Amino acid sequence: MIWFGAIILGASIVAAVKSHQANRLRTAAPKSRPKPAGPKAPAGKPTSTIPVAEEVAMDDKTQRQEHETIINQNLTAAGSSLALSVLSNMAGLPMLDKLAIPGLIYVGTPLTEDGLRAIFKEKKIRASILDMVSIAAMLGTGNIFACSLAVTLLMGSDKLLLKTRDDSRKKTIHMFVKQPKHILILRNHIQCEIPIEQVQVGDTVIVHAGEYIPTDGTILQGDCSVDQHQLTGEAKPVEKTVGALVFAGTLLLSGRIHYRVEKAGEDTVIAQLGEILNRTANYESAIQSRGETIADEAVLPTIFLSGLALTAGIPQSLAVLNSGFGYNMRLIAPLGMLNFLTIAANEGILIKDGRSLDLLGKIDTIVFDKTGTLTLVEPEIVQIRPADFHPENEILRFAAACEYRQTHPIAKAILQAAQARHIDLPPVEQVKYEVGYGIKAEFEGQVVKVGSNRFMHMEGIATPEEPHGHAAQGDQTGSSFVYVAVNDRLAGIIELRVKVRPEVKSLVKVLHQQGKHLIIVSGDHEQPTRMLAHELAIDTFFAEVLPEDKAHLVTRLQQEGRSVCFVGDGINDAIALKKAHVSVSLSGATTVAKDSAQIVLMGQDLNQLLPLFELGAEFDKNMNASFMTTLVPGLICVGGAFFLRFGVLTSIMLYNTGLVAGVGNAMLPRLKRVGKDEPSQ
């Protein structure tokens, strides 16, 4: 009767406390607050500099705080019960054991509710059913100390893992987000320091060496060296001068600059990254679900084996109930994933969808988009063909002068070639741009026309048959041709060709050694695509493929049983990227928020694929090792219960030994890299 009375008293106390707690949570914490819609702040108005990730995460943060509060309360209740039980055994006061029961019921009630809901409402088998049965069995058989110890260790592990998970989440989210609290601006020719929250689009900000750049902007004055490692993955500092863009969260290594604020707050690249990283951290739930599935599938076999163990005795049956087959995985798996997401971020690899990390180790086929992925966006000049008495450098000078203010890839290639040859460009007096055809310009008393063969014909300029015939072969060779005419006479032809990324050949060799099947897909003509595939020793190619057909190709490969990774330029390959098992792009930091890929190589270097696939393989090994930390102790416990008469305390200790080993294994990849992959300062 004493036992029965203690349980009834405990249940009554718990019911009252739980009711009060539910009412408090309903009235205290705000519910999900949708972000108000409306236009962005106009230029010149103060713009909030709180990263949008923090706004998005506010509700998630509130939920985590409530979760932590509940864990703390449960830990306090379980710890108090354990203390009472220990004192009862040490002092020989059985009544103290009874006083421990309300705390155990308090902690066990949510597990019982979840277990009953799974059985009667959802018709599912969940791990909480095993918790419910185990706690009830230990209480019913008078194993108060064992129950107190098991519940306290369970709540303690929940607390430890919650803290570790939050720490990993914060490190991942804030790895890129580094902003000063106050900034120096120039207003009315006077320098003044203001809180970063008051910065306005259009303000002139002053940054000195050793300081972080607070917003996105354009340099107005000064030369500098900027460390963009955490934003773009670039290992070397970037030299910048007037007119160059700077980004929030990057570090000014040397120099002093004045720059105009173009974007602040949630519009900055760094804030967009913060939002993406916050969503990425939440993808741990996919991996957690896999761990929960393992734990759920072990419930019925554990209960069955526990029933069999009754033949050896009640303590042995309880030992099997507490063996914890697969239970740890629902806690350890997401922790391991977060650590690998952090490692990837340190490598300059932004994983936007954590589920792709789980699939990387299974990839056997890689499909590369050709233009902008295997080749650089900007072509290179391979030949300058004089058609008159003008020398090569003069032809290049005329073309570069006309293209000086153009931003398309061919113009950039011509300007870079002129700069490499140290050619001084003359001032251009008049420029007229014919969209899609060419440019007319006047300088040094001459009229210069630069453009396509069609543009030359439109202007009545004759082009010799030999160059014209050679240009007609451009579709087959992958070359582009720019015609330069001076005073209505053809001066020469500049031949440009796409340039293969310098890292591609060595990358292809390593991927082949890893057993990957490599494919090129391109919208270009067949002959240049074939030539590139042959040059790089790539297995298969598909040419003249439309964007939607790229997605069909991915689907076809998947239907053949292949696990496909599509590597493209991010935005133009959106459909194919979404179809692939894993999608990777090199779109870069400035377009990362619009990128359709699951993974972005921030350094825009294909060599980052190698550490990415290595991380995927390491993640698989780590998850398998974590599974062993829960499987082996469980097997030892079951075997020990049947053959060595293990009791419930031995079972609990074995279970928690496996938990400690699993947490250690999940943290091991990060610990091995301490000091090696810290961001540069």
Image: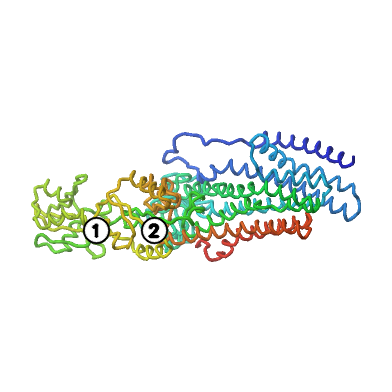
Quadrant location, the N terminus: top right
| 423 displayed left or right of 647 | left
Residue under pointer 2? 517
Circle 1 Cα neighbour tier, 10 Å, few/some/many (<14 / 14–19 / ≥20): some
Q: Quadrant of residue 64?
A: top right
Of the image marks 2 and 1, the number of the one nearer the N terminus: 1
Q: Give the label on residue 630, or none.
A: none
Name the element at disc 1: strand
Q: Position of residue 220 (x, y in %)?
A: 37, 53
**Residue 587 visible in the shown view:** yes
Contact flag, marks 2 and 1 (Cβ < 8 Å): no
Q: In this view, does 98 lie above or below 672?
A: above
Residue under pointer 1? 497
Name the element at disc 2: strand
Q: In this view, does 559 lie above or below 255?
A: above
Q: Position of residue 277 (x, y in %)?
A: 51, 49
Q: Position of residue 252 (x, y in %)?
A: 45, 59
| CA gap, disc 2 and disc 1 | 27 Å
Number of the front mark, 2 or 1: 2
Q: What residue type is labelled 1?
A: Arg
The residue sitting at 58% across, 49% down in the picture is 290
Q: In which quarter of the image is residue 123?
A: top right
In this orientation, which residue lies closer to the viewer: 636 or 269? 636
Q: What residue type is labelled 2?
A: His
- Residue at the outermost right position: 92
